[in-house]
Structure formats: C-alpha cells, structure tokens
Image (cartoon, rainbow, N blue to C red):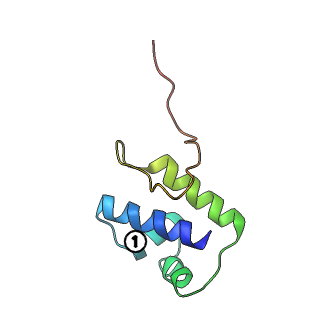
Amino acid sequence: MREQIITVSDFYGRLTGVGRKRVSTIVLNRGSKLDGIVAGGDLNTGTFERAMQWFSDNWPEGADWPDDVPRPVRANVPEAVE
C-alpha cells in the first residue's frame, strides 16, 4: 500500500505541477504524511482507500494512471445525457 500511494501521489504531482507536500495536504490533510510514508511510516487501510479513491476521482482527464497500481472505479463519473 505504501508503494502504491507514493507512486500515485508522485505521478499526480508531476501531472499537475504540485509538490508532494501540497498533494499530501490536499489528499491527506497533512503535508508531511506522504514524506513520512516514504521514510518508512505507515498508514491505515481506510486512509489508503480514501486517498486512492480521491486520486481516482480527481485524476486529470486523459492522463494515464500508473500501470502497476490498481485504480479504484471513479465514484463521481457523471452520467451521459442523451
């Protein structure tokens, strides 16, 4: 889980031009959390799942998701209007 969240958060940061601390603040409400995970810190499963869902729901349109990380189904996909 640690490797996956860092991969996705760093990928997201590169796509959006936002640094890791800012991504950490936006997604985890704590600017140092992602750096703490890189340094060997931990996160609970619920936090991981909420963060991965946030990334999936807010992923830049048209940008590829990292191949080696399972992507949650987007929760906020608007229905097509016919």
Residue bearing mark 1: 22
Instruction: Determine the secondary structure under disc 1.
Output: helix
Count of numbered tags: 1
Residue 77 in the image: above or below residue 29: above
> How many C-alpha atoms fall within 10 Å of the one at disc 1: few (<14), some, or many (≥20)?
some
| Quadrant where the image shows the N terminus | bottom right
| Residue 74 quadrant | top right
Amino acid type at circle 1 is Arg
Residue lying farthest bottom?
39
Residue 75 in the image: x percent, y percent?
58, 41
Seen as rendered, the residue at the extreme right is 45
- Residue 33 point in image, percent of width and height: 54, 78
**Residue sitting at x 40%, y 71%:** 22
Q: Is residue 28 visible?
A: no
Quarter in which the C terminus is drawn: top left
Give me the residue at 39% from left, 63% from top.
Answer: 11
From where the camera sits, is residue 79 visible? yes
Quadrant position of residue 10: bottom left
Identify whether 67 is placed above or below 75. Answer: below
Q: Where is residue 63? Give x, y as percent.
A: 35, 48
Residue at 46%, 17% in the rendered image: 81
Residue sitting farthest toward the front: 68
Residue 58 in the image: state x and y as whole percent. 45, 49
Which residue extends farthest top?
82
